[in-house]
Amino acid sequence: MNDLFERVQKIAPEARCTVKGNRIKITSPLESIVKVAEVVKEYGFNHIESVCGTDYPTTNTIEVLYIVGSVEENLKSKVVILGSRITRDKPVFPSLINIWPGAYFHEREGYEMLGIRFEGHPKLAKLLLPDDWDDDPPLRKDFHLKKWGAIEREDSGLRIERAVLHNPPPECIPTQSDFMKVKTPPFLERFQQALDVPEYDTLGRQLFQWVRKDERTIAISFGIQHPGSGHMRLVLGVDGDIITEVEPDIGYVHRGKEKMCEYKNYFQNIPLLERPTVHDSSGMLFPYVLAAEDILDISDKVPERAKYLRIIMAEFNRILNHTYWLAIMGIFTGHSTMFMWPMGDRELIIDAAQRLAGARVTYAYFVPGGVRNDAPEGWTDYVLKICDKFEERINHYREIYFENPLFLDRTVGVGVLRRQDAIDLGIVGPALRASGVFSDTRKDEPYSLYDTIDFDVPVMKEGDSYARCMVSYLEMYQSLRIIRQAVKMMKPGPVRYHIRGRLRGREGEAYARTEAARGSLSFYIISDGKEKPYRVKISTPSFRNLLAGVKKLLPGHKVADVPVIHWSLNYWAVEADR
Amino acid sequence: MQNEVDPKAVEAIMQSRAEGPQSAAVLVGKVNEVVKPKSAIRRVIDYLIGEPLTYLVNWGRLYSLWPTHVETACCSVEIGASAGPRWDMERFGVLEAFGSLRQCDLMIVMGTVTRKLAPRLKLIWDQMPDPKFCIAMGACAISGGLYEQSYNVLQGVNKIIPVDVYIPGCPPPAQAVIDGIVKLQEKIRCMDLKGRVISESYLRLSPKWRMR
Amino acid sequence: MVKPIAILNAVKSGLRHLFYSRVTRRYPEVESGLPETYYSFDPKKGVAAAGWRGRHYLELDKCTGCQLCSFMCDEISNAIVMVEVPEVKFEQNKKSLFPSIDYGRCVFCGLCVDTCPFEALHMTPEVRLADYDRNKLYYSPLELSIPPPVGKPSYLVGKRKEAAKT
């Protein structure tokens, strides 16, 4: 690392570099940020993760941080956090798209959430917020969350103050007829007007203009109410049957998690933060729990049995995610048997997981300090039996799907993602491994006792949709291998380090990264010594894969290939929108 | 004679209102039934043709509720599981037919409705033909749930769409979804040809009935 | 020719499933298959007992009205409201304050059960809570103290008050 620091100091003498474990933080003044970024990229950090902006009203600055990883052999486990401060009154930052092309959509999100203008970005517009948003940028500290909730609740009046026994007097409670009086809120009326009046030009309409390059192209909305699209809209520019340009329109499930995390303490955040990736909810909580333990200073007090139980739960969730993904892939290619079989087989795994954790999908099982409860009696034998039954079932998928010429015709050679493009755009997960890059966080920087377990990681070279499906299918076998070993290596013991007394985090930052089912997921928490975090930045694999992948891969293909390509990137729009 | 209001009917309605909150549709049905006295021929025709016809039409509507394909948020995982082989929704006639939304009569609002999605949801609801039913599934669709204080979330879908059945849970397990569909079917059995509720026997299925 | 043989393989694999046993559980007539124990938390050991998280079960003779469950849920989803129940008098709860839960907002996370220091709140395997009326989803404390028709109580339910003193 020292020669990296020397090179940075040569160019920008006022820059400061600190190292903590695998994290390298470089802060530089605003004038030399572009040159420092070039030096960092030349050194080997070429895989961008996210762009995080934080508002500090006390010093009247906004701090903009670029979090960058790497796929080179000797730098895989390290992460560079590069940043600089700008003033709140005039927030202008030079865009680093020419250095890391994958930052295109991250900078758009920074623009709408904090109001930062990135100079040099070709199309700076809204991404996640609704079209007619005319209030402050949400992540600034002047924007108070409770103000919105209070206004709506006056309108609805749903709280019963004194619920006394079975027959409450009618005046206390709003009747069902009050609910059935359907109202039209003002934003709905504005939308209805926009449909009739062409001069009222919302962002959704502008996308149609951006996509039409010349008079021959037509703009099609591959939209929300479509059996092949999921919770987002793609506006396609089509010339005949061939797609020439794509604009994704996401934000239909944007619920504002990063803002809401700042109002809850580290335990109350758990049900909130497991809901984005709902199939893989334990995989979503894993990096949050590791980062929160770092801030609360209890990382070394987590018992060993808890670490093995976490591994087992994370691998169950990986299998559940991949079976759901294969099932929907079956529907999109018109193969309804491939919908039914994985949906039925995943119920076997759900049976094993619900006996341990108490719910079918959203477990809320991990807490800072361990896991919430121990396994009931006879659970370990049950898990070993279920693993054998499940493996027998997924052996059948090969004949019916992966060697079926109908499926092969639709996916081989379709949506080829080359190796260098995948690294430049910041793609992660099975899509990256199918393009020939060996990158898996469980092997690069092992967390929570993964280094005591023996398993392989499948990697393929072709990079088309078939390779992406095949990589996920092979990963399921490896997950079963991990579960069997972990179950045998578990020894009886305590399961939780119960924090008693006040919850107080240390001042500083924490960063944690794990391999969720869809790719590598990371949490970056900034805390100022209180029981609630100051800023939580979530960098999800779907956000990185979907937008860049769709914009790069779709042009040149026909309209019938659209569902196959965008679903093979394994995205889930709820996770991308947070 | 026909426009006069029966004082006994008014008293019955005030008494039933004192018993507890009622749906407006129930009260409308009751008033219509009681205020207009029917002639004998009309009653015979209703008995011979009207009631069996209503029963047959409701039977047809109950057992072929086709939902629109609008997946709103996380609860769509449990709808996928309910449509899978173990908890089979298709036994009850709920089939995900990939036709256009002009052919569907059920809208299951699964999960959070954001401000960006809400106007589009209302457009879809307006395009569905009558009679149509709505199920609010999950805590987010009933009242905003976890995200009640967020800046981009609508606090409950009953602000823009009239809801028939509420299923609590986050997400409700597949067993609860099937239970909710069965309850909606019982409610449809108590409707008349135009889709108004005329009888109250479906209320015995509510879980608070055994706690009276 | 590769094509017809590969498609025939797929059809053959599908036809073999005609002779396997059926996977469907005809749910309302047949048992649901949920684990049957209650979810409870032992504050002395700091660890919970495995169980299913459905509708709550409140033990009126252990609850002291300390409002810790309400404080925890205030920032999660605001589903617990403390109400006065003047008809019921217990010596450990002088103000007669008990929690009432709104299932239109409850997320079934179980963190309220984890914070109760007196083992008064548990969660049962009852999930059939669907209703026609939004108001019927507010459950008062006396309604929560009626045990549901499904589920086996854990070892913490029904212990005398000495066990509640930590």
Image: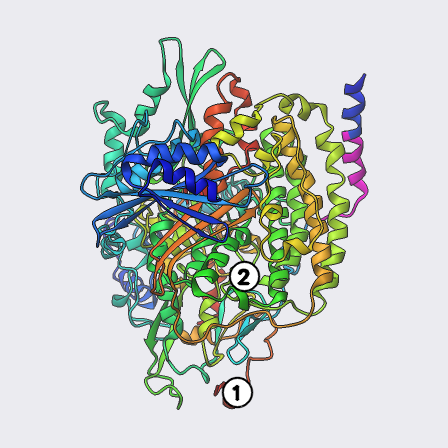
Can I make out residue B38 in this image?
no
Mark number for residue A165? none
Name the image quarter holding residue A340.
top right
Q: Amino acid at mark 1?
A: Ala
Residue lying farthest top? A216
| In the image: residue B53, left or right of residue C74 | right
Which residue has dot 1 on it?
C163
Q: Is residue A254 left or right of residue C53?
A: left
Q: Which residue is mark 2?
A: A365
Q: Tell me which corner region of the image, top left, top right, bottom left or bottom right, holds residue A36.
A: top left
| Closer to the camera in the image, A258 or A66 | A66
Q: How many marks?
A: 2
- Number of the front mark, 2 or 1: 2
Q: How far across and how far down the image is residue A253, in percent?
A: 40, 42
Q: Secondary structure at mark 2?
A: loop
Q: What stretch of residues is rendered in magenta? A: C10-23
Residue A97 point in image, percent of width and height:
38, 29
Residue A179's place in the image compared with A459, above or below, is: below
**The quarter of the displayed image where residue A233 is located:** top left
Q: Residue furthest left?
A: A89
